[in-house]
Structures are given as C-alpha cells and as structure tokens.
Image: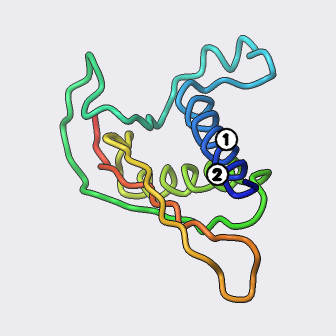
Amino acid sequence: MKRKKIIALLSFLFVFSLVLTGCHISGKPQTAKQKSKKQSFIVSTLHSIPSKNISKTDGFYCNYFIYGGTPSNYRLKFQLAIIQIQAKGMKMGANAFINMRVTDATAALQGSEWNSSIVNICGDFVKF
C-alpha cells in the first residue's frame, strides 16, 4: 500500500513539474523587464514550433539523472537537467530542444529501502 502511494505521488509530481517547466509558470509575478526579454532557448515536446522554420539540425541528444528517495527534490533535479540541456545546446549553436521525451526506469538500490529511478530526457537540438 505504501509503495502505491509513493508511486502515485511521484507520478503527480512528475506531471506537475512538466506542466510548470513547459508553461514557465512561477509563483512570482513577472516584471516589465522580464516580459520584454526575448526567450533565447526553447524546450518543447512538439516536433516543430509553429511559425518557425528549422534552418539547421544539430542532432539527437539525451541527458539523464538518477533520482532516489523522497519526491521532494525531483522537480529540482528535473530543472537542473533541463538547464544542462540548454547549456549544451547553446554551446553547439542551437536555440531549441524539440521533440523532448522523458522516460524512466526504476530499480532497487542494493542495501537501501528506496527504489532508484533513472530519468532519461531525449530530444533534438535545432536552430531556427
């Protein structure tokens, strides 16, 4: 019963973090300077961005992180992985990470009461 509750909570937190990350929602209101600032890097689950033409494809890329224990720090690890993807893409000259897919595999850690998940984030770097 405990395991089902943990899995349900992790599923909820995962979906919630995707919604927050995808919609760029935060608890703080944006200032005028933040509103006028253009977005320099796009992360999307779509195959292409409407009204933008892809001029260059920089290739397929995957990043992963290992998550184990309580669900309290999952969102932080997910956001750090997205920041790493953004840094890698900008270094390659891309300005978007599209067709993003998130998968995970769960395994029991030896000598631990918690399961460990390897979360894989894959997609394509492109330049518009």
Mark 1 is on which residue type? Answer: Leu
Q: Residue at x 71, y 52 (%)?
A: 6
C-alpha separation, residue under disc 1 versus residue under disc 2: 10 Å
Question: What residue sits right under mark 2 in the picture?
Answer: 7
The residue singled out by tag 1 in the image is 13
Front: mark 1 or 2: 2
Residue 29 picture location, percent across and down: 78, 15
State the residue in front, 111 or 56.
111
- On screen, residue 91 versus residue 112, left or right, reads left
Q: Is residue 128 left or right of residue 117?
A: left
The residue type indicated by label 2 comes to Ile
Secondary structure beneath label 1: helix
The residue that appears at 45% across and 60% down in the rendered structure is: 120
The x and y percentages for residue 86 are 49, 49
Please tell me whether residue 50 is drawn above or below residue 110 in the rendered image: above
In the image, residue 116 sits, relative to residue 49, either above or below, namely below
**In the image, what residue occupies the spot 37% across and 44% down?**
100
Q: In the picture provided, is 50 more to the left or to the right than 121?
A: left
Percent coordinates x, y for residue 82 in the rendering: 54, 49
Query: In the visual, does 80 lie left or right of 114?
Result: left
| Rendering quarter of residue 50 | top left
**Residue pushed farthest bottom?**
111
Above or below, 38 relative to 114: above
Circles 1, 2 touching at the beta carbon (< 8 Å) = no
Q: What residue is at 37 percent from the left and 36 percent from the top?
A: 45
> Residue 11 or 53: which is nearer the viewer?
11
Q: Quadrant of the C terminus?
A: top left
